Image (cartoon, rainbow, N blue to C red):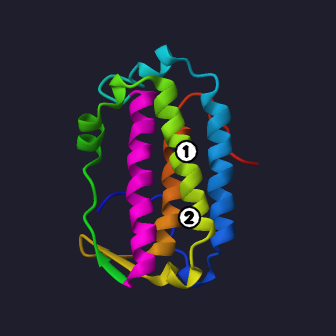
Amino acid sequence: MSPTYSQPADPATLSSHTLAANLRAAIARAETQFASITPEAASQPLSPGKWSIQQTIGHLIDSCTNNHQRLIRLQLQPELHLPGYQQDDWVRLQRYDLLAWPDVLSLWLTLNRHFVHCIEHADPACFTHVWLHEGERLTLGFILVDYIGHLDHHLRQLPGYTHAA
């Protein structure tokens, strides 16, 4: 099982509007954070053997697309068996390092803004629906809360991070 970035919450108490607002705020903070990052800085590994900023944002693109699938599919079915994804291989195979930094950033922003829209209009009654993954039963509500925590985790690793007050 991959690490979790939040504590389990009662999915019945979650609000689609609050989750969307939390993600929207994180995106706005990230957009400010990324404004000062040059293409040269974005392409440099954060430390030896680690991803660059650009590859990290590529990983967050992959996370967004995978969680978008979970959000939509778990509103259509109460229980799903879906694979996870091998994050290092996804980043390697998609070669985010060969794309222009503004394109990677634009894709991340666009996908996350769409994800906010989908979360905001999601049916909260479906937040109790379950993704069965590696012996775990993860509710859609948990997946959404954890996505925001995962995003924050990676943003903290990048230059210029400021957390909400």
Residue pointed to by mark 1 = 110
Q: Which amino acid does the dot numbered 1 rest on?
A: Thr
**Camera-side residue of 109 and 32:** 109
Task: Tell me how many marks there are.
Answer: 2
Question: Which residue lies at the image location 45% right of the left edge and 68% below the top edge?
Answer: 71
* Residue 114 location (% of width, % of height): 56, 54
| Residue at figure coordinates x 49%, y 58% from the top left | 147
Q: Main secondary structure of the magenta part?
A: helix
Q: Mark 2 = which residue?
A: 118
Residue under the point 68% across and 69% down: 17
> Picture coordinates of residue 80 (x, y %)?
31, 78
Q: Which three-letter amino acid code belongs to the residue tagged 2?
A: Cys
Q: Which quarter of the figure has residue 84?
A: bottom left
Residue 55: x percent and y percent? 38, 32
- Point out the stretch of residues depicted in magenta: 52-78
Q: Which of 75/47 is in front?
A: 75
Q: What crowding class fits label 2: few (fewer than 14 Cα within 10 Å), some (14-19), or many (20 or more)?
A: some
Task: Rate crowding at label 1 as few (under 14), some (14 to 19) or many (20 or more) other CA atoms within 10 Å.
Answer: few
| Quadrant of image for the N terminus | bottom left
Which residue is situated farthest in the top direction here? 40
In this picture, residue 164 sits left or right of residue 58: right
